[in-house]
Amino acid sequence: MAHFAEIDEQGIVKQVLVVPDEQEHRGQDFLANDLGLGGTWVQTSYNHRIRKQYAGIGYKYDSTADVFIAPQPFPSWSLDENHDWQPPVAHPEDDVMYAWNEEKLDWEPIVYE
């Protein structure tokens, strides 16, 4: 099976569909024409072998880099040269569980009561 993401004019993923193995080599044509779905379809890889990561609804396809980029998790995070979102403060490297606090722009330990 092969997975294909439908992208809109801005490169945003609208849906992801599975194509049978025998149609993988012509998946975009199969979806757009044979099934009559139209649109622009780009193959994505469930096991991350092509285009960086598996596309999901709301992801963006960067055609220049030929990768799918996850939605920005927080307004303060920035995209690095590897197309990964990075916080303004590095995640602590210890055994404590942390959650990002956007108001404080810092990591906070998760406390279970």
Image: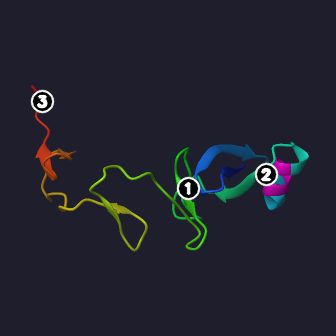
Start-end of magenta stretch:
28-32
Residue contact at pointers 1 and 3, CB within 8 angstroms: no
Left or right of 90, for residue 58? right
Local SS, label 2: helix
Label placed on residue 71 = none
Label placed on residue 112 = 3
**Residue that label 1 marks:** 47
Pointer 2 or 1: first along the chain:
2
For the residue marked with disc 2, what is the amino acid?
A: Asp
Residue at 55 percent of width and 55 percent of height: 47
For the residue marked with disc 1, what is the amino acid?
A: Asn
Label 3: how many Cα within 10 Å (few below 14, some 14–19, many 20+): few
Pointer 3 or 2: first along the chain:
2
Residue at 29 percent of width and 58 percent of height: 77
Q: Quadrant of residue 37?
A: top right
Left or right of 106, for residue 84? right
Residue found farthest to the front: 9
For the residue marked with disc 3, what is the amino acid?
A: Tyr
**CA distance separating discs 1 and 3:** 33 Å
Does 21 appear in magenta?
A: no
Residue at 60 percent of width and 57 percent of height: 10
